[in-house]
Amino acid sequence: MPQPQPSPDPRCRKQRLAGVSLLVGAGGTALDQLSKGLMVHQLRLGEVQPVLLGLLQWRRVENTGAAFSVFHGGVWWLGVVSLLVSLGLVFWLLRRPPRHPLNAVAYGLMLTGALGNGLDRWFRGAVVDWIELVPIPFPVFNLADVAINGAVALLLLDALLQSRRP
């Protein structure tokens, strides 16, 4: 008769989940920066490239503010905020790892958003946005922005699931 396996050490599981967060953050940031670099080399500022006619296009714009261009011209101090949020999130993940996989992915996506747009502020002087939804009057955005919104959605989903757990 097989011996029952001992339950895994909860600290080890939490550390693995922290590793998931950091890997998602690093991988997401790399994809974000790669996509922005590609757009910077492929499109001039303001240039449009249709992708799905009438639905989606690439339009390269630069944002010196935050979401929806609020705090326009605040590149320096928004860069400091991005750096502090990124460092704070990494420190927090190492000290208090996530308890659930959804949280781990969400925190990694948050890190992607803070690092991706923060790196733009520090090294490009503005955030590079390039994804535009044609039929919807919505600001142009980038993969870091998508990651931040994905993080919020996952945290809301996790909160909903937790409220239903006994």
Image (spheres, rainbow, N blue to C red):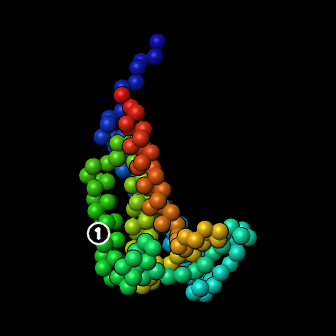
Q: Position of residue 5 (x, y in %)?
A: 40, 24
Horizontal side of residue 53 vs 83, given as left or right: right
Q: Amino acid at mark 1?
A: Leu
Q: Position of residue 59 (x, y in %)?
A: 61, 78
- The residue labelled by disc 1 is 84
Q: Position of residue 130 (x, y in %)?
A: 57, 75
Question: Is 4 rendered above or below residue 125?
Answer: above
Find residue 84 and report its image quarter.
bottom left
Instruction: Residue at 46% x, 12% y: name it.
Output: 1
Residue reaching furthest top?
Answer: 1
Residue reaching furthest bottom?
Answer: 44
Instruction: Residue at 34% x, 71% y: name it.
Output: 82
Q: Which one is in front, 76 or 67?
A: 67
Q: Please indicate, yes or no, whether residue 66 appears anywhere in the rendered image.
A: yes
Question: Is 91 rendered above or below residue 39?
Answer: above
Horizontal side of residue 104 vs 61, given as left or right: left
Horizontal side of residue 54 vs 46, given as left or right: right
Instruction: Residue at 40% x, 60% y: name it.
Output: 110
Image label count: 1
Question: Is 69 rendered above or below residue 145?
Answer: below
Q: Which one is in front, 102 or 54?
A: 54
